Image: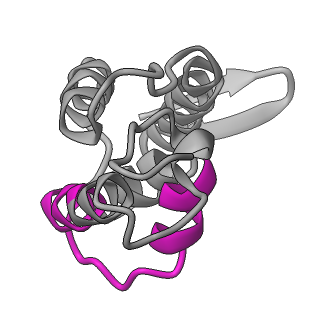
């Protein structure tokens, strides 16, 4: 089925792609509001973020969700995860938790203040 809109004929597939792009744009804008809170663990934030992303219809593909999520991170998490070859959202969260743990233990020095994570050191 096609529809005449402003002199353009759009196929059902083109309409679907337009709607999907609008939804992706909406989620990208909402990412600016949906940021990790200072005392929130990465796991808590990831769960909250994923719940919001799950509300998008049609659903966003897994291979699109992971980079969108990483783009919302800041500081050492973003720096360390931006080039991570993770294939899934769960991989990114697990790796991020290891980074948070290393910051807390002082193995990644002087980075905790960027993330709002308390380290055992005297930062």
Q: What residue occupies the far front of the structure in this picture?
A: 122
Using the image, determine if residue 47 lies above or below residue 88: above
Relative placement, left or right, of 9 versus 17 is: right
Q: Is residue 114 magenta?
A: no
Magenta highlight: main SS:
helix
Relative placement, left or right, of 10 versus 109 is: right
Q: Is residue 83 magenta?
A: yes
Q: Residue at x 36, y 85 (%)?
A: 85
Residue toward you, 27 or 70: 70
Relative placement, left or right, of 103 versus 51 is: right
Q: What residue occupies the far right of the structure in this picture?
A: 7
Relative placement, left or right, of 96 versus 28 is: left
Residue toward you, 3 or 40: 40
Question: Does residue 73 appear in the picture of this structure?
Answer: no
Using the image, determine if residue 67 lies above or below residue 118: below
Q: Position of residue 76 (x, y in %)?
A: 55, 60
Q: Quadrant of residue 111?
A: bottom right
Q: Position of residue 18 (x, y in %)?
A: 58, 36
Question: Does residue 118 appear in the picture of this structure?
Answer: yes
Q: Which residues are magenta?
A: 73-97
Q: Position of residue 21 (x, y in %)?
A: 57, 38
Using the image, determine if residue 94 lies above or below residue 4: below
Q: Quadrant of the N terminus?
A: top left
Q: Residue at x 62, y 52 (%)?
A: 75
Q: Residue at x 14, y 58 (%)?
A: 90
Residue toward you, 49 or 100: 100
Q: Position of residue 45 (x, y in %)?
A: 30, 29
């Amino acid at each position: 089925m096609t529809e005449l809109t402003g002199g353009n004929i759009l196929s059902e597939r083109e309409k679907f792609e337009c709607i999907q792009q609008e939804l992706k744009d909406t989620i990208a804008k909402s990412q600016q509001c949906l940021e990790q809170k200072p005392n929130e663990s990465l796991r808590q934030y990831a769960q909250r973020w994923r719940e919001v992303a799950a509300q998008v219809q049609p659903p966003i593909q897994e291979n699109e969700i992971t980079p969108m999520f990483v783009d919302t991170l800041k500081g050492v998490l973003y720096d360390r995860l931006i080039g991570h070859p993770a294939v899934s959202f769960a991989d990114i969260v697990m790796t991020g938790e290891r980074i948070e743990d290393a910051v807390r233990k002082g193995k990644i020095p002087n980075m905790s203040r960027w993330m709002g994570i308390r380290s055992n050191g005297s930062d």
